[in-house]
Image: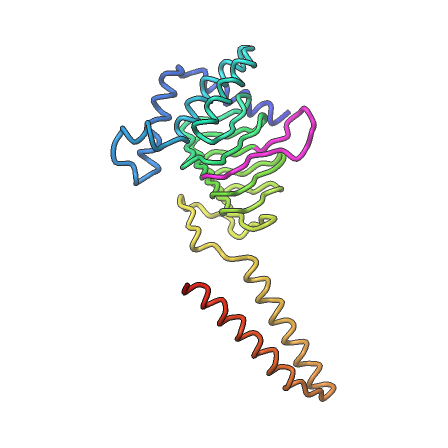
Amino acid sequence: MMSNMSNNQIENKEQKISLWTQLKEDFSVPKLNDPALDSNIELFFNYPGVWAIANHRIANRLYNKGWKRLSRILVGLCSLFTKTDIHPAATIGRRVFIDHAIGVVIGATAIVEDDVLIYQGVTLGGVSLDKGKRHPTIKSNVIIGSGAKVLGNITIGKNSKIGANSVVVCDVPKNSTAVGVPAKIIKRDDRNSKLAHNNLPDINKEMFKYIIERIHIIETALKEEDGIDVSDKDKVLEDEYNKFINAMNSIKKN
């Protein structure tokens, strides 16, 4: 019920402006989101995400008026050029920008609100065969990093950020940052507008570090309690580890 209300609210907002006005707004969005844009000519040749959104505006209107087969054909033709797959039934708000766009998939019951930034390779997919709401709701001002998968009838709260290659299967509160597989909340009340991937923690690295340190503590406790001497085995293991590191470094240099 709530998702239907959100869907209707966005559709009503879209109806307040003409298709032409909305398309002009879509083509102006890259100037605000991409510093690499040098001229308007580039919009026609180097921004498939803009064309994907513009095509969706037309296909969505046809779909809602009952021209479902025609809208699907239009989407199919667009996907050949933009390498994106946006179902014509999906609800997309204003000033949504898909950067680079290649590999983006947005399902039929997905709702993307205003001012959302989506990077390449993102999937807003479903995990159910039910006919009802089965795709995510993305609230306004959300940033979704490249390769992220947001799956199921979940909600990504306003102003939140999803790290690259994360897999999100649960709701993310507003003003939060989520990373990992499956995604975990690492920041709350984070209102910064940028998603600095270089500042996001490597969850797998931190977990391995924890496990190694935990094993070391247990081994030390056992040695002290039972008087076990494993220095020779430690040396062999250390030598094997150093060989592995040297091999990896040589591969990087080559």
Decide which of 79, 250 is in the foreground and name it: 250
x, y (%) of residue 254?
41, 63
Name the residue at the front extreme.
254
Q: Is residue 161 above or below residue 111?
A: below
Name the residue at the top extreme.
66
Residue visible at 62% across and 81% down in the picture: 234
Q: Is residue 205 above or below residue 93?
A: below
Q: Is residue 194 above or below residue 38?
A: below
Decide which of 132, 171 is in the foreground and name it: 132
Q: Is residue 128 magenta?
A: yes
Residue visible at 54% across and 38% down in the picture: 156
Residue visible at 63% across and 67% down in the picture: 211
- In-image side of 130 versus 253 (left or right): right
- In-image side of 60 versus 193 (left or right): right
x, y (%) of residue 88?
53, 21
Q: Report the predominant secondary structure element of the magenta stretch.
A: loop
Decide which of 193, 211 is in the foreground and name it: 211
x, y (%) of residue 218?
68, 76
Name the residue at the left extreme.
39
x, y (%) of residue 251?
46, 64
Name the residue at the right extreme.
226
Query: Which image quadrant: the N terminus?
Result: top right
Q: Magenta segment, which residues?
A: 120-136
Q: Is residue 234 above or below residue 248?
A: below
Q: Is residue 91 magenta?
A: no
